[in-house]
């Protein structure tokens, strides 16, 4: 009898110790709301789409990047696993503008968001295990679950793929750049406080080009040119992120849009532009 009482006493003492500690263990795990708030705080300040390491999956080129997830963990699927009839797909062209190690920053103007009533210069996506070089274009596919789709945990996502080099050596199926991409070219050379804008349409079929350079605060330069090849110098360019946008009226390709995003500290560098219809 005494032995049983001793055993019961030991069990009770153990529970007294473990139960308070177990509550501390559960308290150490942040809630999904807390994690989401931290991610939103990081991304809203910089205008970056899930640039926080904790907000994205470690993926390689051609992988899938999560953009928006709900707080429910009960849904069995993501937007990537839905049947095509339940998904809206939009294709964009992005461009690598910065790279550190294997991690690159991609500018996608079409993904620019409006935050606190102010539209971003461009949408920015961070990609790990990125083999592309600065200036390379990439295809960015945005997937969105339709309202009538089955319940999903992840309602939006991005699929990022390199464009084919068209040299016949690639063994994978990659998207190809449109024919006008190597015909119409935009580049900007930053020279300290000045920038040289260079436009060259080798087809000679450009009717007009409207150019705008701006940062978050003001329009730095705007003008319209009626030539298939020109150079323009913009002086007193501040050391802030800025974007160059062009609307091109071409007799063969119709209306084209070109853009080149330059981060801060871009002096003494050459940035090529990306084009889209």
Image (cartoon, rainbow, N blue to C red):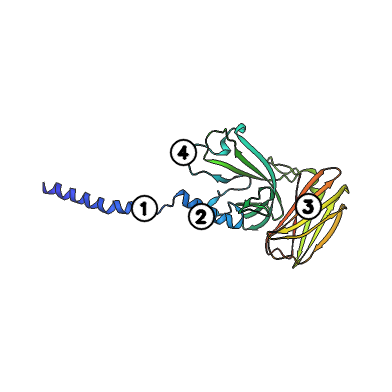
**Are the two marked residues, 3 and 2, in contact with CB atoms closer than 8 angstroms?**
no
43 or 137: nearer the viewer: 43
Mark 1 element type: helix
Question: Percent position (x, y) of residue 207?
Answer: 87, 48
* Label 3 crowd (10 A; few <14 / some 14-19 / many >=20): many
114 or 127: nearer the viewer: 114
Q: Earlier in the sequence, mark 1 or mark 2?
A: 1
**Separation of disc 1 and disc 2 at Cα?**
21 Å
**Separation of disc 3 and disc 2 at Cα?**
36 Å
Residue denoted by label 3: 246
Mark 2 element type: helix
Residue 25 disc label: 1
Q: Left or right of 55: which side holds 237?
A: right
**Which label sits in the foreground, 1 or 2?**
2
Question: Percent position (x, y) of residue 206?
Answer: 86, 48
Residue denoted by label 2: 38
**Which label sits in the foreground, 4 or 3?**
3
């Amino acid at each position: 009898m005494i032995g049983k009482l001793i055993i019961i006493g030991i069990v009770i003492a153990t529970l007294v110790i473990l139960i308070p500690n177990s509550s501390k263990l559960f308290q150490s795990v942040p809630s999904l709301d807390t994690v989401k708030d931290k991610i939103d705080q990081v991304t809203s300040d910089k205008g970056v789409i899930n640039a926080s390491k904790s907000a994205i999956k470690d993926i390689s080129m051609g992988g899938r990047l999560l953009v928006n997830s709900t707080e429910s963990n009960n849904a069995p699927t993501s937007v990537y696993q839905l049947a095509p009839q339940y998904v809206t797909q939009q294709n964009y062209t992005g461009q690598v503008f910065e790279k550190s190690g294997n991690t690159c920053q991609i500018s996608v103007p079409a993904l620019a968001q409006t935050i606190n009533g102010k539209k971003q210069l461009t949408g920015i996506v961070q990609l790990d295990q990125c083999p592309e070089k600065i200036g390379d274009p990439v295809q960015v596919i945005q997937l969105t679950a339709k309202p009538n789709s089955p319940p999903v945990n992840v309602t939006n996502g991005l699929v990022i793929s390199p464009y084919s080099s068209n040299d016949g050596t690639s063994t994978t199926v990659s998207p190809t750049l449109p024919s006008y991409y190597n015909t119409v070219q935009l580049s900007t050379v930053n020279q300290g406080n000045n920038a040289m804008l260079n436009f060259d349409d080798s087809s000679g079929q450009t009717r007009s080009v409207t150019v705008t350079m701006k940062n978050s605060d003001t329009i730095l330069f705007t003008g319209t040119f009626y030539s298939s090849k020109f150079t323009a110098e913009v002086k007193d360019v501040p050391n802030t992120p800025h974007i160059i946008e062009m609307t091109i009226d071409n007799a063969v390709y119709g209306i084209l849009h070109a853009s080149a995003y330059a981060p801060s500290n871009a002096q003494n560098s050459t940035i090529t532009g990306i084009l889209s219809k």
